[in-house]
């Protein structure tokens, strides 16, 4: 493979990554909207917004479901970050209510 072929191949891969990133962002925003609804429902019912056991179960479930090239530790870090940001979103909404 020469430089021109490699450049063209990389361009195609990067285009695929850009498309996937857009899909991931849309899904994260959908997840955030649902997380806000969950937080509002819990507050209305007088339930604690944060459920660390549920968060741990989600993370462990995603690790178990992953069959891809990412190692379990990477999946755990990614989902820990997602959970943290969803919690921040709920807390931000709670403080502005």
Image (spheres, helix red, strand yellow):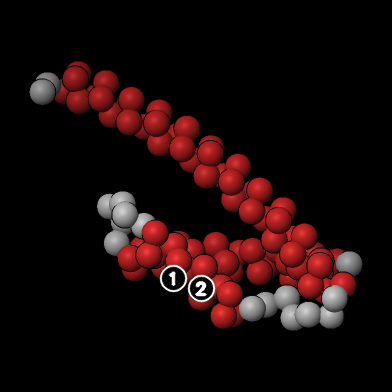
In the rendering, at what x and y percent does residue 65 appear?
A: 39, 59
In the rendering, at what x and y percent does residue 97 appear?
A: 89, 67
Residue drawn at the location 78% of the way across and 80% of the way down: 47
Q: Which residue is mark 1?
A: 60
In the rendering, at what x and y percent does residue 66 appear?
A: 36, 57
SS state under label 1 = helix
Query: Nearest the camera: 79 or 15?
Result: 79
Residue 80 shown left or right of residue 93 in the figure: left
Label number found at residue 1: none
The answer to whether 87 is drawn above or below residue 10 in the figure is below
How far is disc 1 from disc 2 in space, using C-alphas? 5 Å
Quadrant in which residue 41 is drawn = bottom right
For this orientation, the residue located farthest to the left is 1
Residue drawn at the location 44% of the way across and 62% of the way down: 62
SS state under label 2 = helix
Residue drawn at the location 85% of the way across and 76% of the way down: 45
Residue 88 shown left or right of residue 46 in the figure: left
Residue 80 seen in the current view: no
In the rendering, at what x and y percent does residue 46 appear?
A: 84, 80
- Mark 1 Cα-neighbour bin, 10 Å: few <14, some 14–19, many ≥20: some
CB contact under 8 Å: marks 1 and 2: yes
Residue drawn at the location 45% of the way across and 66% of the way down: 61
- Mark 2 Cα-neighbour bin, 10 Å: few <14, some 14–19, many ≥20: few
Query: Nearest the camera: 32 or 67?
Result: 67
Q: Which residue is mark 2?
A: 57
Residue 53 shown left or right of residue 42 in the figure: left
């Amino acid at each position: 493979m020469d430089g021109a072929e490699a450049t063209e191949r990389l361009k195609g891969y990067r285009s695929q990554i850009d498309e996937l990133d857009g899909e991931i962002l849309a899904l994260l925003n959908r997840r955030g909207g649902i997380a806000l609804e969950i937080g509002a429902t819990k507050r209305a019912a007088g339930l604690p917004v944060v459920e660390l056991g549920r968060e741990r179960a989600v993370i462990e479930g995603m690790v178990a479901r992953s069959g891809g090239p990412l190692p379990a530790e990477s999946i755990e870090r990614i989902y820990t970050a997602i959970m943290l940001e969803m919690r921040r979103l709920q807390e931000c909404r709670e403080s502005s209510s």
